[in-house]
Image (cartoon, grey):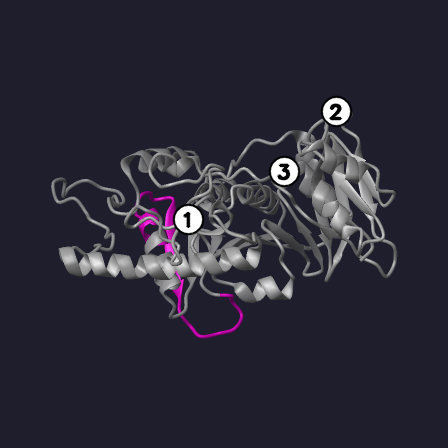
Amino acid sequence: MGGGFAAAEESVFLTKYARHVTILIREEDFTCAKATADAARSNEKITVLTNTQVESVSGDASLRILRYRNSKTGEVTEYRSPEGETFGVFVFAGYEPSTSLVKGIAELNEQGYVVTDSQQKTNVDGLYAAGDVCIKSLRQVVTAVGDGALAATELEKYVAAMQRKTDLHPVPPVTRVSKAEPEKKGPAKDEGLFSEEIRVQLDAVFSKMAQPLLLKLYLDERPVSKELEQYMTAMAALTDKLSVETDRQADTAQERPCVRVCKADGTETGLAFHGVPGGHEFTSFVLGLYNAAGPGQALDPETKEEIQAISQPVSMKVLVSLSCTMCPELVTAAQRIASLHPQVTAEVYDLNHFSELKDRYQVMSVPCLVVNDTQVSFGKKNIRQLLELLQEK
């Protein structure tokens, strides 16, 4: 490969394979041992840049472009790999495990790693740990995935055993209509899927929506489709601004399950979510509804003009994980642009249910943005950064 970006110890190792290695450090200097840092500094194949943060990486089948910013000067540098070459990005987050959540509950070793048995069980019944927070000799994605699969399987067995022991079983949430006020007009309130606090917040958004919307559901036979239908039906029951239409026809035109946000007359707004917009994507989905119905989130006149000046059709696929905290910002930015331009679409995919996209676009991390099925980039982006990327097309 043409180059690589990593931390001190790893970067020295990478010089065996890379022509050159650049280390990008967010702080003023290395935080590792001085001897390790000096080995990197003295290596002629290594360049060290401090006060520097990665903004984005992009490419097609391989990485081609890296943008990084100096946090002190604000200067943005763009690295493009030479013709016929590519580069790699190696993220090093440090050695300190993020286990404060279970501190005082589960047993930890002196370094703060969770102590587990061979089945990923902690010393607490019903509590399992997986991945790099555990004591292990190799910390890589493949081992973390294996840990997760084992922990999930063992936890499933534990839950089944407890259900048999206690004879207690989870009850699926249902939509309940109050009979205390039979004459009350308006939509029924859902008491199962949304808490009172969430309903209050949703009511505040729905009350500001200028136009009603139609949620078109394209479903298949998978359980996730049933979950999406329940979710959207429960949300529509909270307001007269939303209605639901369901399509179960077996065609290949739609990547199901999917909810498409449409105007009341069925005209598509360009916004869609494939999967169930829960987790960190719940808020971004609600904001998408608000943006599609109008008036939407406030934007300065210059940004609006740039959006409306887009002259070619733009198709954006945003590939996310519901547990990703960086994904919603990109999702919201893409949806806001799509809501203001009839030739721009923003379709969000939960990769948990569309694993074939991971292979098709060689997704290394989320959020992943695919523009017109050709330009692939990774990392969170606000609306300004996304517009800059679209203007490069």
Which comes before the other along the chain, label 1 or label 2?
Answer: 2
Q: What's the residue type where badge 2 is placed?
A: Lys
Q: Is residue 153 left or right of residue 16?
A: left
Q: Determine which residue is flagged by label 2.
A: 72
Q: Secondary structure at mark 3?
A: loop
Residue lying at 31% horizontally and 60% vertically, measured from the top left: 156
The residue nearer to you, when weighing 285 against 67, is 67
Q: In this rendering, is residue 100 above or below 134?
A: above
Q: Determine which residue is flagged by label 3.
A: 382
Q: Secondary structure at mark 1?
A: loop
Q: Is residue 103 left or right of residue 355?
A: left
Q: What's the residue type where badge 3 is placed?
A: Asn
Q: Is residue 244 magenta?
A: yes
Residue lying at 80% horizontally and 51% vertically, measured from the top left: 15
Which comes before the other along the chain, label 3 or label 2?
Answer: 2
The extreme top residue here reads 72
Q: Quadrant of residue 178?
A: top left
- Classify 10 Å Cα crowding around label 3: few (below 14), some (14-19), many (20 and above): some
The residue nearer to you, when weighing 236 against 96, is 96
The residue nearer to you, when weighing 115 against 23, is 115
In three-dimensional space, the C-alpha distance between marks 3 and 1, rounded to whole angstroms, equals 21 Å
Q: Determine which residue is flagged by label 1.
A: 278
Q: In this rendering, is residue 249 above or below 76?
A: below
In the image, which residues are magenta? 232-255
- Image coords of residue 170 (percent x, y): 22, 54
Residue lying at 48% horizontally and 53% vertically, measured from the top left: 262
Q: Secondary structure at mark 2?
A: loop
Q: Nearer the viewer, mark 3 or mark 2?
A: 2
